[in-house]
Image: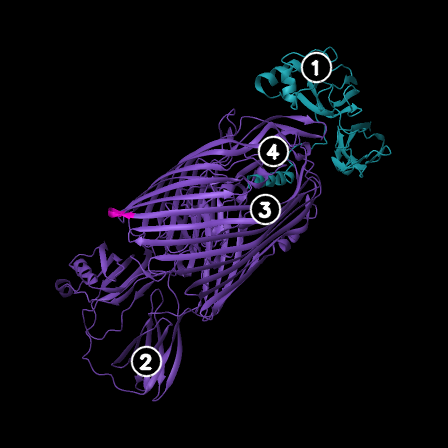
Amino acid sequence: MEVGIVLPSRGVSLRPAVTVSLLVALAATARAQEPAQPVLEPPQILEASEPVYPPEAATAGKTARVKLELVILPDGTTGEVKVLTPAGDGFDEAAVAAIKLYKWVPGKADGQPVAARIQYDVVFELKAPEPPPDLPAAGTAKLSGLVRQRGSRKPLAGAELAAVKGSDARSATTGEDGRFVFDGLPAGKWKVTVLAADHRRRDFDEELRDGDRVEVKYLLTPEGLEEGRTVATGERPREELERRTVTAEQAQRIPGTRGDALRVVENLPGVARPPFGAGALIVRGAAPEDTAQYIDGHFVPLIYHFGGITSIVQSDLLSKIDFLPGNFSARYGRATGGIVEADFREPRKDRLGGHVDISLLDAGFLLEGPVGKGSFAVAGRRSWVDAVLSVAIPDDAEFGFTTAPRYWDYQALFFHPLGGGDLRITAFGSSDKLALVLEDPSEVDPAIRGSISSATYVQRLQATWRRRLGDQTDFSASFSQGYTGLSANFGETLFFELSAWFNSYRVELEHRPFERLKLVFGAEGQFYPYHVTVEAPRLPDEGDIPTPISAQEKLRQDRDGFDWRAGFYSEAQISLPHGITITPGTRAEYVTSLEKWTVDPRLALRWTDGTNTVRAGIGRYSQQPLEFQTDSVFGNPDLRSEHAIHYGLGYDRELTSTFKVESTFFYKTLRDLATLDDALVRRDGELVPIGYSNQGTGRIYGAELLARWQGRGPLFGWLSYTVSRSERRDAPTEETRLFSFDQTHILTAVGSIELPWGIIGGLRFRLVSGNPDTPIIGSLYDADADVYLPIPGEPSSVRLPMFHQLDLRLEKKFRFDSWMLTAYLDIQNVYNRGNPEAFTYSYDYRERVVIKGLPFFPAFGIKGEL
Amino acid sequence: MRRALALLTVIAGAACTEDVSPPEEIKDLRILGVRAEPPGGPAGTVVQIEGLIVSPTDEPFETAWLACAGSNDPTDCVALAGTTLPLPCGSGSRPVCLLGSPDPAPYTLPAGTSQVLVAVLTAETAPGGLAGCQRTLVDEGTLPAYCRLGLKRIPVGGPANANPLLTGVTVTGDAVSVTLNDGAAEATPDGPEDLFLSWFVTTGELDDFRTEGDVLVNQWTLHEGAGSLYVVVRDGRGGESWISTSR
């Protein structure tokens, strides 16, 4: 938020104009309140102090702008002050002296005062002198009205208005609701000037007669990048050792994501690139299934339509995306890789609003507004890929759709005060469906033939209630209930259907017995009855060359089940002098299907002096094997949980207020990984293969660097680089191999800049090592199935060529009085690089061709907003 | 997800095979089928084993048939034999033995196992022959390009089965049709057998390289010269037979 006011001047004066720049980076000292992002309120000026214009500078006619960075303390006084842009000539000292005398309404997190770091520009300008203080002439006209942002119709609080008629000048300031009043105006022609931070000045002419009661609406056009977009990746004020937060608004502007905020995570350090642009999250060398995804605090099995096209919730409804690549706190469990959590934002309370969004892939809508003391939002989206494909696919294609790919999703939010706390009820759902018929069987595996279909359905209804219990305690309870349905079939040889009534809960109590101590106790879990029907061969392990389905024995399972995964956690945050924070925590977990407990201790250390931060952490993480791995037919019911130990060491430095560099070194050990095992065991009196056993191990190590520019102004962006190595040993008797998605170097550069004519342009460039590949060195003929079986060479002994790609995004917003139209063009792979993603083989594996990734792909969309 | 990506690759690959040789074209030495008559039985049953091995060129080739009672992996089977061919079957109980030649070779199903693996190793004589294949497989774990290794599983003591039979083949212009014996698709506890036919030609093009058991016709486009057609039917339980013709 920026407020810059220079009232019309009359005569010469030494009147400093003050520009306040609040980069709301609520300091890391702010306390966490709930699992979701706290409601933040920036500090406001309560009582300003007039700076003294340096006499010599005034005599010399010098002007200056002094940029300050200061800390507003919770008691409303000014703390540390740093001059960021010195001006000399006594201006710096004058600015600092004045600011020290300011009184503030402190910044708040969930209504509680917290320390806040802001930037503040003090502008020294020589003004014409004020005229003699004539008493304004008395009149009977009244001019009142509302100042709004053009397009969004958002009321502009704190806008300054000056009404001038000859030598008679009046001023007014808009309130929180954007309203203002000039009363007692004499009749005549008045010139009204309206100024607001980040908006273009506008002048209006009003002709008033005695006794008039004139109601007006003034619309101001915003200038430059709008508020809320200036926060790049950063750590929100929660006790996570490594948390990278991206605002949803900013995330939508990242090229190559087609405006999908959740896909921004792929551009952060430590995240490998999945082939074909799939949405798999490969975090610090961990398998995709090792990273858990949460929406509004609850686990969801998928966050993307069709594995990566777009996320299942509309980006406009998200407040932010948190990414925890490692060493996460005891609040999170059942994941040995990382955590991705997206939170819904509170719907607007000031008026009804919404949008209609149409792109090449889908069309959606959003409607939101106030309801009672709360607010609501409903949104929906449906793809029309099916209609596009029906035109695009030629008649002689090797496949035809019986149900072309289609997806839809919906979200409904209701936020309302309740019982002295806040209640938020959210519902969301998603469905994907496709069915196609292959004209010919696969030459490599004729079992892949005929109809292929896939359908997913996810629905959730969630309720969260939070309340402050006194000054030192916060309580929150959250429950989620829903249904997950997954089904797929590949011809007559592979069939899978899962129905699960999914429930999850989290109850958390946070208590601060002392100023320097915070305790967190929580219970979090999932329980779900389910029914599964499967007919398929045993799936290949990570790193294996798939054997043709035709040559494998088909297994069948059809059963009901119930699983309860109950987690309990506690954590203490101890703040010591000199900026040191120690956070020990423990998480215990019981899984009914495994009938075993796991206990994971974790410890995080942090030191900061405001500019430099050193982070260190160590912790144990546990994760249950995948469901099919513990199945009595497909797997081994006696499997135990897999484990990882995370070690992390990081150093961050704020080189300037807008440029920050973060570095992290990480090391992970993996134990008890469930891997395929041919050993025979006796079950129910019969000698059968054990299927899987906890015999796999691994280690992952590397370093990450994130240099980010997050200043306000026309430019934001970051450069991230990761170097790492991820190794696995599938059994003690086997050699160590590289993980299938081990990518030694991952370089991503992202930038967005405001161009002339209000166009926002963005670029993303990626340079990534190719994935390891296991060569196929021969084959043998299976005469029973009439297929060839590949003979693998040394595992992961070669790599695909390096991947590089440039993406571009252009966006233009057209503002009309009461609505806005945004048009964007998102081009992936601008220079049409043919990036090899995989190989496909001839029927006997003696020939192969490269499968390339997405070619030049432009996506165009428009969005109309009210 | 890794598994989903693998599947995605397979599906993507299924639509991207135009640049590799199609399976129906016999360009060089190929094993097209291996049959046991009967396809299985209780221990002590004598089965006749034969193969359909085709070379479209006049290059001489040699073949060895191995029976492995103790392994499910044909490469192990060949490796177990060492760098020389093992002793003939029938002269004692061995995990790997050499079946007789020429085809068909009789073999007595042994006791104490649920399955016998038959491995057929064939190679063009000139580059290195069978000895070269065996040596490379044992030393390097792979096969030279001139070698072919096939496998067939013969169940011992399993449910009864009979080979489906192709009783005739007719070529009319480019249209090809075959006929099956009555009852080729036997009844099983899971329903009738799912027969499927594999089609091969030495010259020309086929519309389909694989058809279901109820599709007994194909189109064989012969642009020039003469060629041979081979059709193999399988029942998915180890039963198979074949038929061929030329034009």
Chain coloured cyan: B
Q: Do the dots labelled 3 and 4 sit on one chain?
A: yes
Tell me where residue A402 appears, x and y as whole percent. 69, 50
On whether residue A389 falls in the magenta region, the answer is no
Secondary element at image label 4:
loop
Q: Residue at x 51, y 46 (%)?
A: A565
Query: Three-letter amino acid code at disc 1?
Result: Cys
Q: How far apart in space, not on screen, are marks 2 and 3 (Cα)?
A: 68 Å
Relative placement, left or right, of B21 versus A771 is right
Residue receiving disc 4: A546
Residue receiving disc 2: A182
Judging from the image, mark 3 belongs to the subunit labelled A
Q: Do the dots labelled 4 and 2 sit on one chain?
A: yes
Q: Which mark is residue A861?
A: none
Q: Do the dots labelled 2 and 1 sit on one chain?
A: no
Residue receiving disc 3: A562
Give the camera-side residue of B57 and A801: A801
Judging from the image, mark 4 belongs to the subunit labelled A
Marks 1 and 4 in Cβ contact (< 8 Å): no
Marks 2 and 1 in Cβ contact (< 8 Å): no
Q: How far apart in space, not on screen, are marks 3 and 1 (Cα)?
A: 51 Å
Depth-wise, is mark 4 or mark 2 nearer the camera? 4
Residue receiving disc 1: B97
Judging from the image, mark 1 belongs to the subunit labelled B
Tell me where residue A813 appears, x and y as whole percent. 45, 62
